[in-house]
Image (cartoon, rainbow, N blue to C red):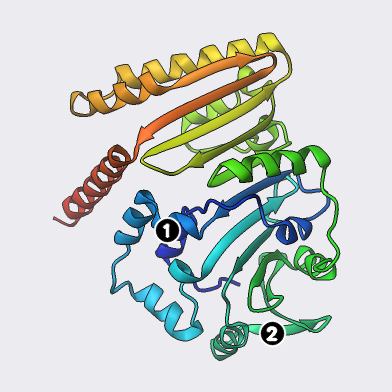
Amino acid sequence: MKLPTVSALSLCFLFAGLLPAADQQLVGMLMPDAKVVAGINVEQAKNSPFGQFLLSRIPNEDHGLSHLTGATGFDPRRDLNEILMGTIGQPGEKGLVLARGNFDAQRILAAARAAGHTIETYKGVELLTGKEDSMVHAVAFLDNSIAVAGDADNVKAAIDHRNSSRSINPALAARIDQLSASEDAWSVSMVPLAALTNQHVPDTKLNGMLNSDIVKTIQQTSGGVKFGAIIQLSVEAVSRSAPDATALADVVRFLANTVQMNTPQAGQAAVTALVQSLNVKADGNTVKVGLAIPEDQFEKVMRSSEHKKTSLHIGSEL
């Protein structure tokens, strides 16, 4: 099953809000064996400079978004407050996406029925279900403020525990609390990075880097982004040992300098400024990376990227 999606929705997932911490009811519905969790707070960041910039990039006449809103009453630009995603960190598509916002559940389900999708009931909750390959997916609305999507087994388990929270790994829970209280969008992985990157990717250089010995030393990762006049990105990687962390920090610095040296002259000043703002530090067996990007400069990079894509598209049609 493929539910209706629009490109604008992916933009809205980038918005973040300055909330005290991750919604504990949503956290409580994660699978107990979750090892990779990411969160995005949506509400207040719509008023940040970057949030306003993203909203301005969504055409008013966007057909997909207009169709979605007209059929379901749901507008992601207006109705999303927070998103939480979790998996067990193993190959496959099992996982959960939980969202808090404003959902007209009956209208959404009516639109799904009209489009020919399957609706079933589980413990009084209607599920929008479908099968892709060998996996059954489901979407459920626990009320008009919480939506749950993912593989059917995990969605049903979330319904079972909607009023009695389940316990996730205490170290994972603590890191979620820390990051969600200070970052607008964040992620935490308790899985060795090599286990998440063991699948071959088309890019030969990237594939080689992901399978390098230094990457295999990374046991846990976490990071976040904070929007404002200065967009601040932070990443932490826990290595097997202090020497491994020192080596990893050296590799990060080397890669940054390599990017700077290979940047075309037109973008040299901007990249140089970014590299100079890069802060890489090995602290015991942990590598901490920080990067500060002026928001207006980030807008210029995005506009430049869009311009290049448009030029390539026009050129291919000539």
Residue 140 position within the rendered picture, expressed as x and y whole percent measured from the top left? 69, 74
**Crowd around label 1: few <14 · some 14–19 · many ≥20 (10 Å):** many
Task: Give the numbered dot on residue 17.
Answer: none
Task: Give the numbered dot on residue 119.
Answer: 2
In the rendered view of the protein, which quadrant contains the C terminus? bottom left
* Residue drawn at point x = 25 percent, y = 41 percent: 300
> How many numbered circles are shown?
2
Residue 43 position within the rendered picture, expressed as x and y whole percent measured from the top left? 50, 60
Instruction: Name the residue at the front extreme.
Output: 20
Q: Which of the 4 quarters of the picture holds residue 131?
A: bottom right
Residue 63 position within the rendered picture, expressed as x and y whole percent measured from the top left? 34, 75
Measured in 3D between alpha carbons, the distance from the residue under mark 2 to the one under mark 1, in whole angstroms, is 33 Å
In the rendered view of the protein, which quadrant contains the N terminus? bottom right
* Residue drawn at point x = 47 percent, y = 20 percent: 279
**Kind of residue sitting beneath label 1:** Lys
- Of marks 2 and 1, which one's residue comes earlier in the chain? 1
